[in-house]
Amino acid sequence: MARPVQQASDPARPAAGQAGESGAQGAELAEVRAQLREAYETIEAIRSGGVDSLVIGPPGREQIYALASADRPYRLIVAAMNEGAATISPRGIILNANPRLGAMTGQTGTQLAGTAVLDLVPSAHRPAFGRLLDVGAGDSARGEVELSGPGGTTVPALLAVSGFDLDGLLLRCLVLTDLTAQRRAEAEVRTLNDELEVRVARRTAELERVNKNLEAFTYSVSHDLRSPLRALSGFSAALVEDYGDRLDETGCGYAGSIMAASERMAALIDDLLVLSRVSRAGVNLEPVDLSAEAGAVAGELRSRDPGRVVRFVIADGIRVSADRSLIRTVVQNLLENAWKFTAHRDGAVIEFATAVTAEDGMVCCCVRDNGAGFDPAYAAKLFQPFERLHDAAEFPGTGIGLASVARIIERHGGRTWADGAVGQGATFYFTLTAADPDTASGARPASRTNAG
């Protein structure tokens, strides 16, 4: 923008007749000195960037001389932009355009200058394009447009238009960002999503076939294998009953081993069927009072073995969102596990409570006992099928119960883990979605103690 150089008076100009000069000659010399001083100040202003144009001439006949380098930084910046840019007049004529806009439209910036801005888009898009351009001074608008590209193509672009006032003229600045790469990426994402859906459908069909095969296998296990097991157990019992007096101690021991192995095999089959069932069963979520479930299981354990004295400490008010049948299996397996491994402990204590740490919207429950415990180095094996860390003769079992617990909790979106030490008891943790937000906040419910 032209800024005229202001003529400055010279306070050091000598008065007429001063320093030996007098009359008209002294006044003329002083005027020459003033003009030299003004020329010097003008040159310094140009050097320092204080002006970008000069206004020369008497009033009414001024001439404006713009400096060639005045807007050079601005032009360099606009020319180097990755976005297309243009300035348009009040009548919608392109006053200037940068090379990037030319590349987007297949023209040069010089060719675009002087053309109608509406020519940048196909005729079908011009009404919407015109509405975006209709902004006043200080206003702005944004929207997506389709530019007329080279060779009859179209170029998707994001338009940002701003209006500004220049000496009473409403000019508008356009900045257009090429969206071709973005649209290509979006198309690739859609293609990948479509392929992913096909893969998911294929994998789902494969999973359904596997489940059907598993159902067929479990049916075979349930029916076909039970018959020979019953035969082994039955004939072994008949052998001892009918011919026990003819068998020596070793023979009776063999028969007893056959019966025990048959019973163990039957128990394994039953547990495998349970594991298969919990892995495939539907999950119907509803509010469940885990404290009540734990109390019921504790009562059942006491009824089975009334001779044992075990103190149960069960926290009140632990409510979760879970499948009632499946989660009852979790509570039952964990409490039975604690009951079993405290069998040799005087003053056995089994606790069902919530842990102090819980994730957002989840409640962390734990079953803690002071029983045999386990070596923490093998904690990762606890939830694997058939993995046992204790002698079966001392603590009988098939190693399926904790695996079923892990499967059920996983199907509920939670996780399981354990810690303990040999001879110092064990604690088993699991997380579930809380039915009551107060439970998930970390508040510890009150607990009740029952001894039996």
Image: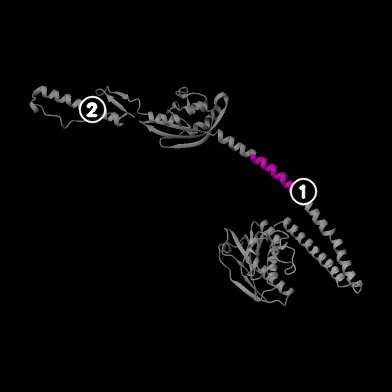
Q: Which residue is mark 1?
A: 209
Q: Which residues are drawn in magenta? A: 192-209
Q: Quadrant of residue 326?
A: bottom right
User: Could you say where residue 221 lies in the image, as x and y percent from the top left?
Assistant: 82, 58
- Disc 1 is placed on an element classified as helix
Please state if 219 lies on the left or on the right of 305 as rendered. right
Q: Earlier in the sequence, mark 1 or mark 2?
A: 2
Give the class, few, some or many, for how many residues have Cα within 10 Å of label 2's Cα (few <14, many ≥20): few
Q: Quadrant of the C terminus?
A: bottom right
Please state if 118 lies on the left or on the right of 362 as rendered. left
Q: Quadrant of the N terminus?
A: top left
- Disc 2 is placed on an element classified as helix
Q: Is residue 201 visible?
A: yes
Q: Is residue 296 visible?
A: no
Q: Quadrant of residue 242?
A: bottom right
User: Could you say where residue 189 lies in the image, as x and y percent from the top left?
Assistant: 61, 39
Does the stretch in magenta take in 194?
yes
Q: Vertically, is 348 above or below 182?
A: below
Q: Which residue is mark 2?
A: 40
